[in-house]
């Protein structure tokens, strides 16, 4: 009787957690192997003769610092733009009458379901007509979709928990829609803003398909494209490749860890600070 | 919902949807319409597209690579979607209860979702390396066969399916949220009846979560049919012998390597058709099993 | 309260400003592929061109691998922002020529008072005449497939060093003797362009009609003999690293690490080979089939001009690159076998101290080259054929069934428009 709770409460979750942390652990451990070392005998956790050499080599071999800077520029524009578009749209949906609201939510759900690959060739056409191929514009433009319509719905849902009385009071004070959105409603849904910011950062930092299609000039490459470049130059230099992976993963990992509370403690109510 | 529409601002707010509306039209609706438009043309990206009737359709019917691609995609959905759903549900139910280290466990479960997909694909290329890779190291230590994973059609498919069983954060959070919304009194009643944890899962949790799981299965079918582009592009480049030439990879080859925008558009329409058919099937099953109303 | 909005607008404006930077003088983009060592030569060449032509600003856009170059070129052409000038292999330019997006270099060459066709080896030019008459792109080099070999390993095994005119039997005997433990005798990509010279040496043909091909012909006669001989290297003799080993460490790394006796590649890898410190290496011509003729395959990249680009400035870059100075810079980097006669004879190319010790092998080899087709669909055919060939070479696909598929599956690709 007393063994089962231990098993279910800790051993199984711990084992599952270890399994899901393993890609990161394997990435770290593999990046420390000396280059050209023979295959390990048996299972290896910290490699013999562990070294950080691959980390300096990776920056020497490709202009990774420049690629990281490009990625930073993209997220620095795309994430705030996403917050702006998604919160405005979410707020508008909150205020719509019942029928248009159903339509807006329904369309957003459909939009959420459209696979990117279904439109990539023709979306390419749109950006070509606009003359913005080989710039960051197509990369940040998805922020107009709220990066993903799901993020608009997160906001819509969070704003729905802001009671009418608060908005009506603001209106009585003479505040317009925009002022009410900015000074009254947004501060009430900070957890949603945090969640949307983390999700948008994760998406734009990791985005590979859009840079692959739209960036031609090497100096414009973002970090994920840099990893691909590294793979093509040194297809079997594992410590080097994995060191590159660690470098590209660290920023997004840091952002996730900073914001994880809002997802992992209580995903339903965390978005609803009024009840917290 | 406690909020209706706040009377004072309801009418003047629709314009706030503007930027979002522009995005949806310019980046989704218009491209989607163009895809259907180009599907029956000879568009190369340069010429003025001319309507070519069923030429592209006939080409697809007799194109062995398209057949291989369709097979690869269908197998992938059949294997990956249940596995991903199982993983997400299992992890969520295992780690949902508040307890010491609870958030640490949940953070670990979400970690692979955070890793950029190119990096994750490279890590799994290493994980499945026949000589150095951790998986074969473990198999070797256990005295088992060490397969050359990516050289075998099924090995390569499984390698990608296994990799895709890791970034399941979205579904994980959804099940986590769904489970927490369940009424605790249901479990109290079950405990009074002497139900073991397994029986609680079978007779309380599962039926209650079934509608959510059905929705997640549908969403995951759509998503997995497209997100397998990056792992296939980075790990196997469609190989070996087209075993992982998933539809998006083949569309990419046709449209962006060989100037076959028209044919690529037709393949995309077929991809959407396959997706719709799979979703229809799932909805039908869900209805038959009375999961969805 | 509107500050964040204003900030975003400012950022967006700055972004689009970056996109369309000012246009004083000419700005041209040069796209090519290569690794760090290969690119060094091009960087120097571009720097000297810019110094001599202050009104032209060149952006070098390198891509890692040939395959990626194709995708990048296609997306940039389709995106309406192609590079003004790019270097591409003769097997790959056909699909661009077919779309009519290239500016023929012939009229520029005719009008040029810098470049004279008589100064160049004519071999590579035919491969770059898309319509068979006027020159589409200007070939920069005259490389071919050769055998890189590890001199120390040959001597340790007591083997004679490969010499001109050595035979398939000599080659196989050496590869067998060199294979020992984790050292393998030979490394090669299992690709059409690696098999082709063996087929030609044996008197066979790769396609039915080189100018208007409709099918591969590797399944019959001397072509089939040569293909079987090539496949036997892996399937029967085991002198190449097996699948498992190749995935752990590719042949190029294995050669650099001193554990591969011979490695088939073109001049392209010479800059990388020059970084070797632990052992001596050299190059040899490909072995000759029994009773056959010496043969190799052309490896040549050419400068192509985008019809929509700044063709005038781009041509000036080509003139510099193909002039004596430009060819000398690239030859000294090790990257190219110059197609100019004067530079072929110069110390810049013959640099024996840097390696290889017998550079004239490249000139001899170039005298025996042939080319695969360069039609619009050849890239697609080759990609599919390479995939199937790899399956057979590593024993994943039965030889007979595989060769049948090699012919059948590729056939419809020849006609795909």
Image (tube, coloured by chain):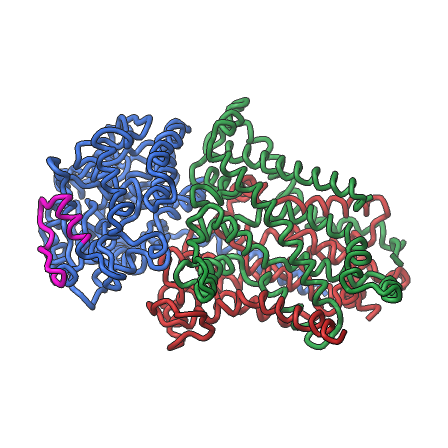
Above or below residue A125? Residue B104 is: below
Q: Looking at the image, can residue A121 be seen?
A: yes
Q: Position of residue C290 (x, y in %)?
A: 12, 38
Chain C color in figure: blue
Would you identify the image quadrant in which residue A81 lies? bottom right
Q: Which quarter of the image is occupied by the C terminus of chain B?
A: top right
Chain A color in figure: red
Residue in the foreground of this view, choosing between A114 and C301: A114
Q: Looking at the image, can residue C61 be seen?
A: no
Q: Residue at x 26, y 26 (%)?
A: C209
Would you identify the image quadrant in which residue B104 lies? bottom right
Q: Residue at x 37, y 67 (%)?
A: A39
The magenta-colored residue range is C155-176
Chain B color in figure: green
Q: Position of residue B47 (x, y in %)?
A: 46, 30
Residue C164 is one of the magenta-drawn residues: yes
Residue C203 is one of the magenta-drawn residues: no
The reply, left or right, for residue A106 in relation to residue A212 is right
Q: Position of residue C190 (x, y in %)?
A: 30, 45
Above or below residue A204? Residue B58 is: above
């Amino acid at each position: 009787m007393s063994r089962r709770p231990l098993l279910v409460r800790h051993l199984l979750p711990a084992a599952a957690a270890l399994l899901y942390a393993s890609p990161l652990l394997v990435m770290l451990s593999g990046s420390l192997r000396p280059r050209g070392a023979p295959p390990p005998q048996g299972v290896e956790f910290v490699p013999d003769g562990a070294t950080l050499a691959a980390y300096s080599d990776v920056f020497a071999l490709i202009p990774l610092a420049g690629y990281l800077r490009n990625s930073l520029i993209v997220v620095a524009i795309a994430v705030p733009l996403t917050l702006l578009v998604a919160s405005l749209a979410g707020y508008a949906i909150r205020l719509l009458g019942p029928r248009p609201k159903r339509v807006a939510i329904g369309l957003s759900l459909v939009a959420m379901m459209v696979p990117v690959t279904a439109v990539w060739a023709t979306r390419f056409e749109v950006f070509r007509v606009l003359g913005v191929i080989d710039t960051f514009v197509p990369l940040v433009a998805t922020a107009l979709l709220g990066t993903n319509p799901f993020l608009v719905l997160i906001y819509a849902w969070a704003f729905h928990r802001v009671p009418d009385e608060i908005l009506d009071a603001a209106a009585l004070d003479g505040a317009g829609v925009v002022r009410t959105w900015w000074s009254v409603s947004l501060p009430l849904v900070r957890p949603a803003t945090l969640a949307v910011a983390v999700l948008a950062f994760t998406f734009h930092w990791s985005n590979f398909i859009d840079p692959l299609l739209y960036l031609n000039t090497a100096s414009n490459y973002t970090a994920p494209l840099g990893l691909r470049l590294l793979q093509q130059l040194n297809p079997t230099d594992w410590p080097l490749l994995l060191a590159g992976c660690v470098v590209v993963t660290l920023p997004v990992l840091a952002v996730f860890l900073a914001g994880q509370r809002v997802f992992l403690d209580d995903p339903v109510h965390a978005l609803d600070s009024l009840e917290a | 919902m406690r909020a209706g529409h706040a009377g004072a601002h309801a009418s003047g707010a629709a314009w706030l949807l503007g930027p979002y509306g522009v995005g949806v039209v310019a980046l989704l609706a218009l491209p989607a319409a163009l895809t259907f438009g180009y599907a029956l043309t000879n568009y190369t990206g340069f010429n003025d597209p001319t309507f070519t009737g069923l030429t592209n359709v006939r080409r697809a019917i007799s194109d062995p690579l398209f057949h291989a691609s369709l097979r690869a995609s269908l197998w992938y959905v059949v294997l990956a979607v249940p596995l991903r759903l199982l993983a997400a549900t299992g992890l969520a139910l295992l780690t949902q209860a508040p307890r010491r280290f609870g958030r640490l466990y949940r953070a670990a479960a979400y970690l692979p979702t955070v890793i950029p997909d190119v990096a994750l694909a490279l890590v799994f290329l290493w994980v499945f390396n026949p000589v150095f890779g951790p998986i074969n190291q473990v198999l070797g230590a256990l005295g088992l066969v060490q397969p050359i994973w990516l050289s075998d059609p099924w090995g390569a498919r499984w390698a990608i399916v296994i990799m895709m069983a890791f970034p399941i954060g979205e579904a994980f959070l959804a099940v986590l949220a769904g489970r927490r919304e369940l009424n605790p009194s249901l479990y109290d009643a079950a405990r009074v009846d002497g139900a073991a944890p397994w029986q609680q899962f079978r007779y309380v949790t599962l039926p209650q979560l079934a509608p959510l799981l059905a929705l997640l299965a549908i969403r995951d079918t759509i998503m997995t049919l497209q997100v397998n582009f990056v792992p296939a592009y980075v790990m196997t480049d469609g190989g070996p012998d087209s075993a992982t030439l998933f539809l998006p990879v083949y569309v990419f080859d046709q449209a962006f390597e060989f100037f076959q925008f028209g044919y690529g558009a037709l393949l995309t329409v077929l991809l959407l058709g396959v997706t719709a058919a799979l979703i229809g099937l799932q909805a039908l099953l869900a209805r038959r099993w009375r999961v969805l109303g | 309260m509107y500050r964040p909005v204003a900030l975003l607008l400012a950022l967006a404006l700055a972004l689009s400003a970056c996109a369309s930077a000012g246009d004083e003088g000419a700005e041209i983009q040069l796209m090519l592929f290569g690794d760090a060592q290969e690119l060094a030569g091009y960087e120097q060449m571009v720097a000297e061109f810019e110094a001599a032509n202050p009104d032209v600003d060149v952006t070098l856009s390198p891509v890692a691998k040939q395959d990626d170059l194709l995708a990048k070129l296609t997306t940039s052409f389709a995106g309406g922002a192609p590079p003004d000038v790019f270097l591409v292999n003769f097997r790959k330019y056909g699909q661009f020529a077919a779309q009519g997006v290239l500016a023929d270099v012939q009229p520029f060459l005719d009008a040029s008072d810098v470049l004279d066709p008589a100064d160049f080896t004519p071999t590579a030019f035919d491969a770059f005449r898309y319509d068979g008459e006027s020159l589409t792109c200007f070939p920069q080099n005259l490389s071919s497939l050769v055998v890189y070999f590890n001199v120390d390993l040959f001597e340790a095994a007591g083997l004679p060093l490969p010499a001109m005119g050595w035979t398939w039997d000599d080659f196989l005997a050496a590869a067998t003797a060199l294979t020992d433990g984790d050292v393998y005798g030979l490394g090669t990509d299992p690709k059409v362009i690696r098999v082709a010279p063996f087929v030609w040496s044996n008197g066979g043909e790769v396609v039915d009609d080189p100018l208007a091909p409709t099918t591969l012909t590797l399944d019959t006669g001397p072509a089939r003999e040569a293909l079987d001989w090539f496949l036997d290297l892996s399937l029967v003799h085991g002198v190449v690293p097996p699948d498992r080993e190749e995935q752990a460490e590719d042949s190029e790394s294995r050669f650099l690490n001193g554990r591969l006796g011979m490695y088939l590649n073109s001049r392209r890898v010479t800059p990388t080979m020059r970084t070797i410190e632990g052992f001596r290496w050299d190059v040899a011509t490909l072995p000759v089939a029994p009773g056959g003729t010496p043969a190799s395959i052309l490896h040549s990249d050419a400068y192509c001009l985008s019809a929509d680009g700044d063709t005038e400035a781009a041509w000036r870059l080509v003139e510099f690159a193909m002039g004596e100075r430009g060819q000398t810079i690239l030859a000294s980097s090790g990257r190219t076998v110059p197609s100019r006669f004067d530079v072929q004879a110069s110390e810049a190319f013959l640099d024996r101290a840097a390696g290889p010790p017998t550079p004239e092998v490249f000139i001899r080899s170039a005298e025996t080259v042939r080319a695969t087709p360069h039609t619009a669909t050849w890239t697609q055919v080759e990609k599919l054929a390479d995939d199937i060939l790899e399956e057979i070479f590593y024993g994943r696909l039965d030889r007979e069934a595989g060769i049948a598929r090699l012919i059948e599956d590729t056939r419809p690709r020849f006609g795909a428009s």
